[in-house]
Amino acid sequence: MSSRQAERAEARARREAAQREAEARERRRRRLWQLGAVVAAAAAVVVVAIVVSSGGGGGGSKKLKAGRPPQSAQVAALLRGIPQHGITLGSPRAPLTMVEFADLKCPICRAYSEAALPVLIRRYVRPGKLKIEFQPQTFVGSPPGDSERAARFALAAAAQDKMWQFSELWYANQLDESTAYATDSFIRQIASGVPGLDAQRALADRSSSSVDGQLQRASTLFQNAGFTGTPSFLLGGRGQPLRPLAATVDPGQFTGPIGRLLKR
Amino acid sequence: VSDRGLRITIAALALAGTGISAYLTYVHYAGVQVVCVAGGGGCETVQSSSYAELAGIPVAVLGLIGYVAILASVLVTAEAGRLGGAGLALAGFGFSLYLTYRELFTIKAVCQWCVASAVVMALLVVATVWRLLLVGEDGATDEPAPARAGL
């Protein structure tokens, strides 16, 4: 009798063990499915985030897709609320002035615009410590006239106090410097990403005597400073002569001298 | 490792991540210079780049929200807490990898705070996935001596 009871108990224990093992297997299977679902959901979120972050690609791409140019919102946010008068960005009362000589088709100028300029704007221009003048150059001569078309439109946009939005958005969407991409169509497309800029008026103004004079002045200033390439910079305090600044792309090359001048 | 141990680990890592992202959020809105341990302009360059924002929202703010949500997930002993924690950590880690790629190959500058956050997020992936796979529905591990939940 006791032997039969023991056999029954043993069989029950085996059944229960088998059941527990089956349940454990089921739990493990379920958790692997859950992990797969979580990984898939996370991957979907990351893909969406990457697409939004990339914004369709920035400078250096082979062509610009139709529609509002990428980075329009970022450029608008960078410059929002900062005073702008003609070619000058920043408060007219800022104690320091920096003059930027750059070519809209020059890739290093774009690198400066992406790496250093946002730092300068955030740290010095927005708080009213520095104002920056943009003196466009027409250095990239291949193909001929392309740089000048871009520079002329930028100066015409300055008459509407929209030069900085235009030039920064241009840099964000800059294409291969060896191609003739500064067409009216490309210019219009970049201008479409600048709220408040009357592109038609700027296209008409770019051949004006005023733009001719500004372009000539920008070139003369560049030569008088002894510069030979872009980007090049002059920096100085109020009432002081502007001096060449040995800086190109690295923010530290700007923040050091600017910080020292502000401490004086 | 007990569920309690994993939750404490996740909470500690999420707190570290919260600290990093809170600092970067402060820097973003206060307009002050980022403190970079080894000097150089890497942090400033990365924080000022277009990749520092996603759809107009600073990435630091998104990170802060993510870390706080992971921290909150350890307080939820139910399955939703484990799933949510693992999902957030995996998504955060995936995006961290993308940002690190951008730092190295697009911005060409490295921000130590971002690298630290990526490392924290990688550790969070290990801990949260471990918690998801090893902890039973009753909040106990599959180990022979189950431990009740309770942080």
Image (cartoon, coloured by chain):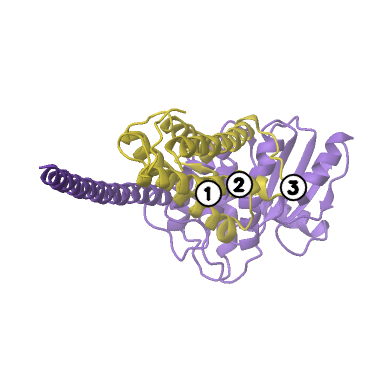
Residue A238 appears in the figure: no
- Quarter where residue A20 is shown: top left
Residue at image position (45%, 47%) is B125
Of the residues shown, which amino acid type is indicated by label 3?
Answer: Val
Secondary structure category for the residue under label 3: strand
Judging by the rendered image, the residue that carries numbered circle 1 is A169
Chain B appears in which tint?
yellow
Judging by the rendered image, the residue that carries numbered circle 2 is B116
Q: Could you say which is closer to the camera, residue A83 or residue A128?
A: A128
Residue at image position (82%, 57%) is A224
Q: Are marks 1 and 3 on the same chain?
A: yes
Residue B29 placement (x, y as % from top left): 60, 31
- Badge 2 sits on which subunit? B
Secondary structure category for the residue under label 2: helix
Q: Could you say which is closer to the camera, residue A5 or residue B149?
A: A5
- Badge 1 sits on which subunit? A
Location of the C terminus of chain A (image quadrant): top right
Q: Could you say which is closer to the camera, residue A87 or residue B76?
A: B76
Judging by the rendered image, the residue that carries numbered circle 3 is A99
Instruction: Please tell me whether residue A16 is drawn above or below residue A180 in the rendered image.
Output: above
Cα distance in 3D space between marks 1 and 3:
19 Å
Residue A29 placement (x, y as % from top left): 25, 51
- Badge 3 sits on which subunit? A
Chain A appears in which tint?
purple
Residue B90 placement (x, y as % from top left): 42, 47
Neighbours of disc 1 within 10 Å: few (<14), some (14-19), many (20+)? many
Of the residues shown, which amino acid type is indicated by label 1?
Answer: Leu
Residue B132 placement (x, y as % from top left): 37, 43
Cα distance in 3D space between marks 2 and 1:
32 Å
Secondary structure category for the residue under label 1: helix
